[in-house]
Amino acid sequence: MLIVQISDTHIAGWDKKAYGIAPVAENLSTCVEHINQLIPKPDIVIVTGDITNSGLTEEFQQAASLLNKLAVPYYVIPGNHDDRSNLLSVFSGTACPVNDLNQGQSGKNQSNNSQEFINYVVDDFDVRLIAMDSTIINEPGGEICGKRAAWLDECLGENREKPTLLFMHHPPVKLGVIESNIDGFIGSERLGTIIEKYSNIERILCGHVHLPTFVRWCGTIVSTAPSMGMRLSLDLTMEQPSKFHLESPTYQIHHWTADNNLISHTVTINEIDQAYLFEEH
Ligand SMILES: [Fe+2]
Ligand SMILES: [Fe+2]
């Protein structure tokens, strides 16, 4: 199974660049075209939050117009730059199946906490996917409150065997950069206590920090995906203010192999994209 992860697209509206500089819509369009040409074809695409730059409906509409060109199903969750109700007004149905509430579709997409949080389960593939809403309204940091933790515990308890991936915007562990250490994550210990109970969680896939990172945490691995061309300028001194660099559109492919391993590749779409044979050089 192939899962493509796009994160932090920060779409800023028609004909607008994020922060006036980053050509995010153009980058996302390039990225979608690249994904559509992948062989083998991916099974699904997940978009791990900060879909928009300001949470506006027109930004979500532009993001949807680009993401709808994907040739495979995609799923979205909110980030701190997004707005839950505006997101739900644009992405409904398959892209964000929170509306399939307790409709007897057990084992498929489900949620038990209405639209208060954008949480759902996708159970149609070899790997089970659990989408978690880690956002706090008008705050940059993340949170898993008691209600979200209880929902997650119940979902995980339904199937302790099937390989499972969680995806949420905020990494629950400090990654040594401002966006993680300063923004914070309320309820990290609460979440960790639940994660430790289940040995079938292959990975927690996150975004938010605009950098590809991997870290062991509570018996699983937390990874973060790069953004859509706005790379966090790496500064381990964590001096304010934080800065970003422009980079080529970048995404990740998570390959669940026949050997039951989850192997992650970071794909950068370079302008010079020619392949050379090792034996000829
Ligand atoms: Fe972001
Ligand atoms: Fe974020």
Image (tube, rainbow, N blue to C red):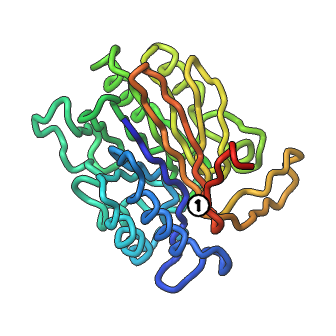
Residue at x 51%, y 86% (from the top left corner): 15
Number of labelled discs?
1
Give the structural element (helix, strand or loop) at label 1: loop
Mark 1: give few (<14), some (14-19) or many (20+) Cα within 10 Å.
Answer: some
Q: Which residue is painted at 43% across and 57% down in the image?
A: 35
Q: Residue 215: name its quadrant.
A: top right
Amino acid type for the residue under numbered disc 1: Ile
What residue is shown at x 76% (from left), y 49% (from top)? 178
* Residue at image location 43% in from the left, 19% down from the top: 259
The spot of residue 133 in percent (x, y) is 43, 45
Q: Position of residue 239 (x, y in %)?
A: 88, 53
- Residue extending farthest to the bottom is 15
Residue to which mark 1 is pinned = 269
Q: Estimate the x, y position of residue 167 in percent, counting from the top left.
A: 46, 39
The quadrant of the rendering that contains the N terminus is top left
Left or right of residue 254, residue 188 in this image: right
Q: Is residue 52 or residue 143 the one in the foreground?
A: 52
- Taking the image as four quarters, which one is ligand 2 found in? bottom right
Q: Quadrant of residue 163?
A: top left
Residue 109 at x, y percent in the picture: 23, 39
Nearest to the observer: residue 53 or residue 223: 223
Kindly tell me whether residue 118 is visible in this rendering: no
Image height of 94 relative to 167, above or below: below
Q: Is residue 6 visible?
A: yes
Q: Residue furthest front?
A: 280
Which of the 4 image quarters holds residue 131?
Answer: top left
* Relative height, residue 234 to residue 159 (above, below): below
Tell me: is circle 1 under 8 Å from ligand 1: no
